[in-house]
Image: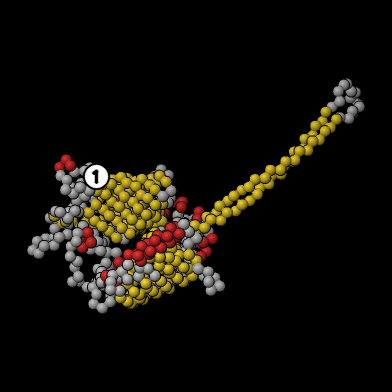
Amino acid sequence: MNTSLIVSLVVSTTLLFVGCGSYTRTERDIYTITNADTVVTERVQNQPGDRDNGIIYPSTRSITMARSVNQRDSVVDRHYPSFIRMGLFEGIGLIGSSIGDARSTQTGLFGMYYDLKSVFFNAKEDTSQSSLFSGYIYRVGIAEWKLNWFDNDPGWSWGVTSVEFIRPDGDNSHALIGAGVLTINKRFYFRSLIPYLTIRPSLSLSALPSQYVNASVSAEVGSIGGVNLRAYVGYAFGANVITPPVQFVSFPYVGIGASVLDFLNREEELDVEWKYHEHSAWEVGGFEFVLVGSTAELSALAADQVGDKIPVMKGGTARIGFASIALPVLDYRLSLGTALINVVALGAFEYGLGVFPIRLTYHWNPFRTTFVVEPFLEYNFAPSTFAHLGVRCAIPVGNQMSVQLVAGWANGSTGAGVTIPGIPELGRRIDDDAFSSTPNFSTFYVGIGASFLDRLFGRGDLRYGKGYPHE
C-alpha cells in the first residue's frame, strides 16, 4: 500500500505541474518591417559677375538622389487560454449513497460542514440524528482541455483531477481515493452568456491508490467569478485498496456541489486573447490573512497568557478561495461574495469558522486609483453561526498581491460549546483547556494584513456598462 501511495502522489504532483504550465497558449507573430526612403537634393548656383537686366544667363543646377533601406524584425506574442476548465476545489454532498447500514459522515451540504467539536476538540460525534447527506466527494486540482474527436464534435473535453476523495458514508472501508484521475466530459450549453447553464455527462477513471469508475451527469451553473453550483446524479464502483481487507464497493448517488476558483471557457473563448476576456467579479483571490487587535480579554494566539503577558495582536482572520461577484445595482459596485473557508479568531473564546459564507460588499475607489474601500456585511451559517460587519481598505502592491487595513465587529456563536446536562451550554476556549459561561461572543477589532494570489479589479475592468450584447 505504501508503494501505491508514493506512486500516486508522484503521478498527481507531476500532472499538477503539467496542468499549471498548460493554462496559457502563446502564439508568436514575427514580422520583417522594411523602411525604404529616397532623398532628392537639388542645388542651383548662379553664375558670378554682372549681368544686364534684359539678358538671362543659364544657372548651374545639380541633382543628387540618395536611397536608403532599413529592415528590422518585429515580434508580437499573443496569449490565449488553453483550458476548458481549471479549478482549485470542488465539494459535493452526497444523498442516498450509504452502503448497507453505514452511518452518515455528518458533513451536510457540499460535504463541507463538519462539526467543530468532533474535528478540532476530539468530542464524540453525535450520530443519533439522521442526516439527508450521507457522504461527500472532494476534488482538488481540476483541469480540462479540449478533446478533438468525433470529427471535432464541440463540447468534448478530457481532464485530470490531481486528487479525488469519494466517501459514500462514514465507513472508512467504503472510501475511494484517486490520484491523477482521468475524466472524459461532454458539455451541452443551454445558455451562451455568463453564467453558463450546462448539462455535463462525465466518466472518471482512477488507477491508484483506489481503482474505480465514476459515471455521472451534472447540471451546472457557472462559472462566474470562479464560483459554480452543480447538481449530480451518478454511480460509482471500484475496489478500495487503502484500508484492508480490500473490498469491492458500488453505490448510486445524488449530489449537490459547489466550487471556487473554478473557471470555465467555451471553445470559442480559447481564441480570445487573455487581455480581452470579460470579468464579472470585483475580486478573485486565493488566500488572505489579517492580524488583529480586539476587545477580547484573552488572546487566541496565546490563550494561557494573562495580564501584561497578553499579546497586542489577539488573533486574526483568514479567507481561502474567495470571490466578490458584481450585482446589477449601484453602478455594479455592490457585490455578492463567498469563500471556501472563512476563519475569524479574535480572542481565546471569540472565534468562528465559516464555510461558503454570504458576503455583501460595496466597492468604492475614493481617489480614482487602485486603492479601494469596501464596507461589508457577512453572514456565516456553519459550522459556526455568526455575523461579521466591517470595512476593508486595500491597495494592490503587485499583480496578485495587496496590503489591507480592516476594522470590524463579529457577533455570534462559536459552534463549539460544551453541553452538560442541567446547566446552560458553556463556551470552550480555543485551546480546549478552559471554559466560559457561554459560547456566544461579540467583539470589535482592527487589523492589518495581506492577500496573495488575489486579483482586484476596477470598475473599468468589469464587463458591464460597455454596451455588450449580454446587457
Between 242 and 261, the residue placed more toward the observer is 242
Name the residue tied to disc 1. 313
**Going 43% across and 61% down the picture, which residue do you hit?**
15
Q: In the image, what residue type sits under mark 1? A: Met
> Residue 324 is drawn in which quadrant?
bottom left
Residue 467 visible to the viewer: no
Q: Is residue 417 left or right of residue 174?
A: left
Count the labels in the image. 1
Tell me the quarter of the picture where residue 435 sits.
Answer: bottom left
Name the residue: 25% across, 64% down.
114
Identify the element where label 1 is drawn: loop
Left or right: residue 77 compared with residue 4:
right
Observer-nearest residue: 456 or 183? 183
Q: Which of the pair 136/421 is nearer the observer?
A: 136
How would you rate the neighbour count of disc 1 (Cα within 10 Å): few for under 14, some for 14-19, many for 20 or more?
Answer: some
Residue at image position (23%, 61%) is 119
Q: Residue at left 31%, top 69%?
A: 242
Residue 217 x/y as whole percent = 40, 74
Q: Position of residue 239 (x, y in %)?
A: 34, 74
Which image quarter: residue 103? bottom left
Which percent across, then down, holds residue 433?
15, 54
